[in-house]
Amino acid sequence: MTTTYPTPKAIAAPSLPLIRQVVPVQFTYDVHFTTGLFELNNPLLAQVIAADGEVGPKRMIVVVDSGVLQCHDKLLEQVAAYANYHHDILTLSTDAIAVPGGEIAKNQPEWVDQLHQVINTAGICRHSYVMAIGGGALLDMVGYAAATAHRGVRLIRVPTTVLSQDDSAVGVKNGINAFGKKNFLGTFAPPYAVLNDFSFLTTLDDRDWRSGMAEAVKVALIKDAEFYRLIETHAHALANRDMAAMQQLIYRCAQLHLDHIAYNGDPFEMGSARPLDFGHWAAHKLEHLTGYNLRHGEAVAIGIALDSTYAYLSGLLSQSEWQRILKTLQMLGFTLYVKELGDYLDQPRHPQSIFKGLTEFQEHLGGELSVTLLSEIGKGVEVHQVNLSLYQQAILIMQEMFESVN
Amino acid sequence: MTTTYPTPKAIAAPSLPLIRQVVPVQFTYDVHFTTGLFELNNPLLAQVIAADGEVGPKRMIVVVDSGVLQCHDKLLEQVAAYANYHHDILTLSTDAIAVPGGEIAKNQPEWVDQLHQVINTAGICRHSYVMAIGGGALLDMVGYAAATAHRGVRLIRVPTTVLSQDDSAVGVKNGINAFGKKNFLGTFAPPYAVLNDFSFLTTLDDRDWRSGMAEAVKVALIKDAEFYRLIETHAHALANRDMAAMQQLIYRCAQLHLDHIAYNGDPFEMGSARPLDFGHWAAHKLEHLTGYNLRHGEAVAIGIALDSTYAYLSGLLSQSEWQRILKTLQMLGFTLYVKELGDYLDQPRHPQSIFKGLTEFQEHLGGELSVTLLSEIGKGVEVHQVNLSLYQQAILIMQEMFESVN
Ligand SMILES: NC(=O)c1ccc[n+]([C@@H]2O[C@H](COP(=O)([O-])OP(=O)(O)OC[C@H]3O[C@@H](n4cnc5c(N)ncnc54)[C@H](O)[C@@H]3O)[C@@H](O)[C@H]2O)c1
Ligand SMILES: NC(=O)c1ccc[n+]([C@@H]2O[C@H](COP(=O)([O-])OP(=O)(O)OC[C@H]3O[C@@H](n4cnc5c(N)ncnc54)[C@H](O)[C@@H]3O)[C@@H](O)[C@H]2O)c1
Ligand SMILES: [Zn+2]
Ligand SMILES: [Zn+2]
């Protein structure tokens, strides 16, 4: 081993002490709940912008999920009329940009490039606004573009699905897929504001309506037994698209996610623990194994059922609570078994075995394995190793209980 | 004005209160000062990585400025030998990636894409390391790639120029250029650690050695009269590449920048004030107008001279302090006038007039105009409007004083 690097003889070895830098950053944003956001008599959006206290009218560009546009064909006119009505407060710097909704929005880096271009030509600065209207996928993509232009321009999220209103859009993450990996590119970047408009939910298809409730079950199970009972009690109404029950579910679920981010001590996930990812190691893998035929929430429901079953088998969770969980998921309309869950069950290292999901989950987070289980309804616990044969048993039990149901 | 948007009649107007989300995030990183960083008997790098407390060896990829490699042709072997020597602590996941230094690194998005690819194939996760060795431009580009992969992998910065050691690399910003605009793409992302190795400075060319001192003069002028006197006293030694004087300059300058970031209350620059950008509105424009023939620091020196002259003319700064400033800049070897400063002096809206820089500066930051001036040496003051004819006068004075000198 040679050390031929030019030894800096001329340089006095410095005895300068290290400088420990501590940078406290505080992000603040409001999450609002409304209906008819773009009705002229709804002042919310104008108020949110006027509240920046800066000289108006403020520039804004609008990016919309084309799946939303299909169901709300007057939306762009309405946004334009709204901006026109409040022309002293906001001005649309360019025509709205429509982007296909769903995972497509996150699979093509070209969308991000295009938004960067529009941000540039429209003269959007760090004090201007990008408003994104759509499902979680579109919001993730627009959020990434907004967070990286000028090191971050203001993003107003208008989530239009249950999942985005109760979970993804209230949080601090964005991202797109790359190299075939979910969210390979992205940043942590809190929004400027989140405007949850329940009216959009009326046009969701049943699967998207249902899918977003899995995150509510998840967060209730790990954090809030009372909220869990509320979901359980209203499961039938929720499955039948009762809007009042859904509003309650979204509000409480969003609140629990927000509190977790604010108070868990690791909002930008620098450590390895991710309790909110209960049920998610299997879910992520199942989404992939089914070629994204499963919606995220549908996969999460199966992941919750699996990890609850495992928790029961390992003696952590009581039998009665385990059964209550499965029953609620079923009442909400979730399918709890897909073929891909049982494939290659005895070959845990096979790339198409569900168990590869454990390794991939660990790799994505980095550090040691950390899986959330339940000790009771409302109480998540972290474990750092798992028993594969118990997991195999859990899957066989689920197969027996639910395979025929489909 | 029509409101044909489907009125959500079925939805009870929700009276759900907004949720105000406050997310406190704390970033901590150490800035170290050393020589011979990759000598086998220098434990610093190994210690920094071992201090993460996680199971080793930790994966790392290395990205190097090829301008540095030219002057330190054994560097890659030495890094490899170092990793080999500390193989229980770190492991190089792939060969080092050499990237051209200087602004080229920031002008081609392909470099960022390539690094994302390497991060993917090398299995770098949020608990692995990217080490970037080079000047401020390379560090900005690698920083952007590292901050956006997996929503941020750990970045160890090893700055190799005066400017990057005393300013850019100790801070929280990264970025690349796009659409012909400096730093159009980027994020705020604190590094994992900064390792300042003075040995690298021995091979800098004179312009790069000098250029980085402009930021020290700048921060001294707005914040620290005592530091300013230190620079003034050692100006001759500094101009003649006295390493001991330079170490002092870098240490204090880095410290002032770090303190500013930590204590100014706006580390991620959400407001409009940017006191550290003293002298920079003109500097940015001059870099552009000279087709980047001027180094950033060279342009900053002219910007400082200009804003100090303006401060003197407007009665803010005393004549004697104004002259001390010009003298120090000259002693350090800076050229204080370039032709582009005086072009289109009476056409402030001309795209090639220096005064367009004021508008562009405001647009980049967003919000109202905010320019830092001096009321005395060591004391910056923010102003929100400027008198163009006084600025014209300042430029004419500088022309008279310094044009012939060149
Ligand atoms: N950033 C985060 O923290 C986070 C958290 C969880 C999930 N996610 C991401 O969210 C995405 C899933 O989001 P999603 O569940 O909202 O689905 P989605 O965004 O994929 O949208 C599903 C479909 O619904 C359509 N749609 C959206 N709103 C509609 C409406 N009001 N009426 C009719 N159709 C509508 C879309 O066009 C799309 O076709 C995934 O990419 C996932 O990775 C992100
Ligand atoms: N992120 C921030 O907060 C911040 C702040 C200020 C400036 N910057 C950026 O920093 C960049 C300028 O950085 P810089 O002044 O370090 O110059 P640079 O990175 O442009 O490098 C200048 C030249 O020096 C060479 N070089 C680097 N180290 C060397 C060494 N030890 N020996 C010999 N040659 C060496 C490089 O290859 C390059 O050719 C600009 O892009 C500017 O925008 C960023
Ligand atoms: Zn989820
Ligand atoms: Zn600078």
Image: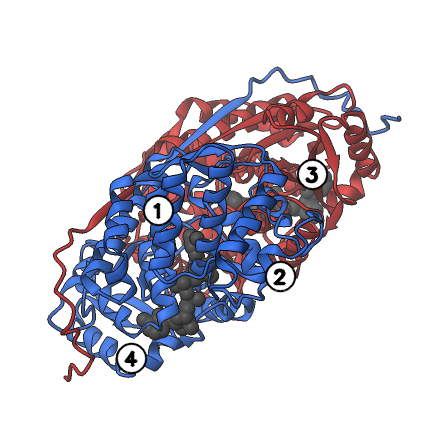
Chain colours: A red, B blue
How far apart in space, not on screen, are marks 2 and 3 (Cα)?
Answer: 22 Å
Chain at numbered mark 2: B
Residues under labels 4 and 1: Cα distance? 38 Å
Q: Earlier in the sequence, mark 2 or mark 1?
A: 2
Location of mark 1 (residue): B324
Which numbered tag is attached to residue A60? Answer: 3
Q: Residue at x 50, y 64 (%)?
A: B294
| Chain identifier of the residue bearing label 3 in the image | A
Q: Residue at x 68, y 54 (%)?
A: B344
- Cα distance between the residues tagged 1 and 3: 46 Å
At label 3, the amino acid type is Met
Q: Which residue is located at x 62 percent, y 30 percent?
A: A195
Question: Which of pointers 1 and 3 indicates the residue nearer the eye?
Answer: 1
Say above or below: B273 vs A11: above
The answer for which chain carries disc 1 is: B
Callout 2 and callout 1 share a chain: yes
